[in-house]
């Protein structure tokens, strides 16, 4: 998590340098340095993942699923260490699908903030004239909803494959994948003030399920 934060801060500094970003970077500098020294391979992998995203941004990519999937695939390597003997292609597919779903949800939820901050967002890149989030969603509600349904289906299909070999925690993960994540997606589309908290609730319960990042 610290290494992801490090590269997110780096990405923010490239996109839109700010006093807030520099302050957070300074506050976490000791923890980041420790993580870099303890997990240099993970640091490299996460950095490469963000570099792949940066390449897509440079190319002007307008496909949020491609961007999320690319990032997820770039980060699957540490998964084998975390999962141990449970590692499998199906688990990696699930991880990639989950990362893509989170990326799409965040991109939808952050439309207004990204426009204001000048942060890259594939939806904004495809929009020649962005007025505000409400106006954008009014014009693109059906296509956004269809896209969100598609990434939810991909996530649930990938989970169904992994579920076949699960021996415990099925009820917990079922609730997350079939209820929690779709609820977060719905909140993101609706622009609900609880969208971010719902995403956090769905993905940060790491003691109860397989870790995402």
Image (cartoon, rainbow, N blue to C red):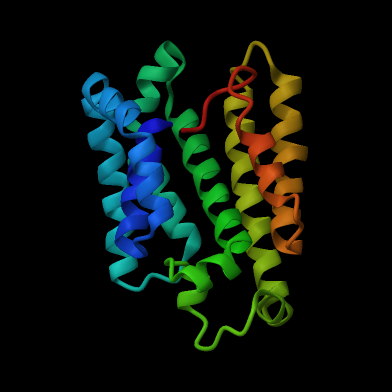
User: Can I make out residue 77 in this image?
Assistant: yes
Q: Is residue 99 above or below residue 207?
A: below
Q: Which quadrant of the structure image shows residue 24?
A: top left
Query: Residue 205: where, in percent of width, then height?
Result: 64, 26
User: Can I make out residue 75 in this image?
Assistant: no
Outermost bottom residue? 129
Could you tell me which residue is drawn at 31 percent across and 27 percent down? 30
**Number of labelled discs?**
0
Give the position of the N terminus as an image quadrant.
top left
Query: Residue 27: where, in percent of width, then height?
Result: 38, 36
Query: Residue 148: where, in percent of width, then height?
Result: 65, 58
Q: Which of 37 and 212 lies nearest the eye of the viewer?
A: 37
Q: Which of 96 and 195 lies nearest the eye of the viewer?
A: 195
Could you tell me which residue is drawn at 64 percent across and 11 percent down? 167
Q: Which of 194 and 108 lies nearest the eye of the viewer?
A: 194
Residue 119 shown left or right of residue 184 in the figure: left
Could you tell me which residue is drawn at 61 percent across and 63 percent down? 108
Q: Is residue 8 above or below residue 34?
A: below
Query: Residue 75: where, in percent of width, then height?
Result: 36, 37
């Amino acid at each position: 998590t610290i290494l992801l934060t490090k590269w997110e801060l780096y990405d923010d500094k490239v996109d839109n340098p700010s006093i807030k970003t520099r302050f957070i970077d300074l506050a976490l500098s000791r923890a980041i340095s420790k993580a870099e020294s303890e997990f240099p391979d993970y640091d490299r992998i996460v950095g490469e993942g963000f570099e792949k995203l940066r390449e897509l941004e440079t190319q002007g990519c307008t496909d949020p699923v491609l961007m999320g999937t690319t990032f997820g695939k770039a980060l699957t390597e540490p998964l084998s260490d975390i999962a141990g003997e449970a590692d499998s292609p199906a688990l990696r597919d699930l991880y990639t699908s989950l990362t893509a779903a989170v990326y799409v949800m965040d991109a939808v939820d952050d439309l207004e903030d990204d426009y204001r901050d000048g942060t890259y967002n594939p939806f904004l890149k495809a929009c020649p004239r962005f007025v505000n989030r409400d106006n954008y969603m009014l014009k693109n509600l059906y296509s956004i909803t269809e896209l969100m349904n598609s990434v939810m289906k991909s996530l649930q299909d990938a989970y169904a494959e992994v579920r076949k070999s699960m021996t415990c925690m099925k009820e917990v993960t079922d609730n997350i994948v079939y209820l929690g994540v779709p609820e977060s997606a719905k909140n993101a589309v609706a622009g609900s003030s609880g969208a971010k908290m719902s995403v956090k609730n769905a993905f940060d319960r790491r003691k109860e399920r397989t870790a995402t990042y």
